[in-house]
Image (spheres, helix red, strand yellow):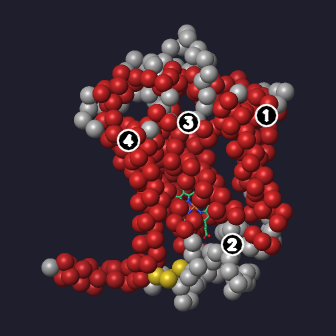
Amino acid sequence: MPKRIVDWLDLRLGIRDILEQNLTKYLLPRNINIWYTLGAVLLTLFALQFATGILLLIYYQPSPQEAFSSVQRIMNEIPYGWLLRNLHAVGSNLIVAVLLLHMLSALFMGSYKRPRELTWVSGFLLLNLSLGLCLTGYLLPWSQLSFWATTIATDAAGAIPLLGADLVGFLRGGTAVGEDTLGRFFALHVMGFPLLFGLLVAFHLFCVRRTGVSKPPFGPDYTPPKEHDRFHHEHHPGGIPFFPHYMAKEAGVISFFLALLVAITFFAPGLFIPPTANIPADPFVTPPGIKPEWYFLWAYQVLKIFPSELMGLAVQVVAMTLLALLPFIDRSPERRPARRPLFVALFICGIAIFVGLSIWGYFS
Ligand code: HEM
């Protein structure tokens, strides 16, 4: 019976041809490595994040009076509510970690270079959008942690000369974090950002599929691909089929990250949900030692070490702009790390500075 349905559809839509072109006859480089599977890990984690997010929406109430108690109800009364909430909170942290690894691997293997500039730029926008999703989601439980972390984060925009005060007012919908901040963060978190995110992911995958996956720049028979003046899809004759060979590899890595997510959710959810997240927001009591999430600690510390917040902000903007425009700055076609010693040195320094600032921020 299923064969008859497939035959019927195939006659009208040619689905066997689409599947062949994109699965069994779609060949990837023979020496493709595990780092290339992180994109698929991200797609899986985001799908899970959307699913748990939609289920949480059934009970969540976006108002200062009810937000905290609705989250407590999800945690304590709704069947498996605690599981959904913890999976969503831990999942967001795991996604940022995998995003950073995916970006670092693209940097190390030079896969941001021509003709993949648009893949890189769309990826960079996705990273920022994901951080925006984390920031807006953080306020929703309306706990002391949410309230004060958002107050600190939106305060930073005030350092911008002339526009600062207006920008803070625009972000908060008033002079202080309150009902209107929750309203706009909620709208962005559940609708605005996810819509934009879906479009950008589609564009990112379109870029990857059109240019073809890059050949890993390792091994004695690696030769840099020729530069083309016209559009050229990078083929890999003699490579491994996407299905079933490569998908089996992806399934293994995805299983590892899902196991990690489940392990943290069950055994150490407190790693990402500190005690101040369990106290309702009180605008009149500033709790001591409020810190942003681990992935914002570097930015938080940069704001503190410079004599003025404006300088700190400027350093962050310059660093992020350089990263976004990297494919247009580093234009040599060489991708082998051994032949890019200056880049590899800067790459290691960059990671060391990020980790160092984050640890400093955590203990300061
Ligand atoms: C929601 C976030 C993202 C998703 C779902 C995603 C997904 C993917 C997938 C499925 C691939 C193809 C397989 C692979 O190389 O992993 C890929 C490739 C790529 N991604 Fe992403 N990505 C995301 C974010 C990013 C970010 C933040 C960057 C960098 C700033 C980035 C840069 C790249 C580059 C340069 C490639 C091409 C790799 C190559 O062909 O060698 N992506 N992405």
According to the picture, the residue beneath numbered tag 3 turns out to be 135
Q: Amino acid at mark 3?
A: Leu
Q: Is residue 346 visible to us here?
A: yes
User: Which circle's residue, 2 or 1, is located before the other in the chain?
Assistant: 2
**Spot occupied by residue 23 in the image (x, y as percentages of width and height):** 42, 78
Q: Secondary structure at mark 4?
A: helix
According to the picture, the residue beneath numbered tag 4 turns out to be 266
Q: Amino acid at mark 4?
A: Phe
According to the picture, the residue beneath numbered tag 1 turns out to be 312
Quadrant of the snapshot with the N terminus:
bottom left
In this view, the mark in front (4 or 2): 4
Q: Residue at x 50, y 22 (%)?
A: 276
Ligand 1's quadrant: bottom right
In the image, taking residue 29 as reference, residue 78 lies left or right, namely: left
User: Which circle's residue, 1 or 4, is located before the other in the chain?
Assistant: 4
Rounded to the nearest whole Å, what is the CA distance between mark 1 and mark 4? Answer: 38 Å
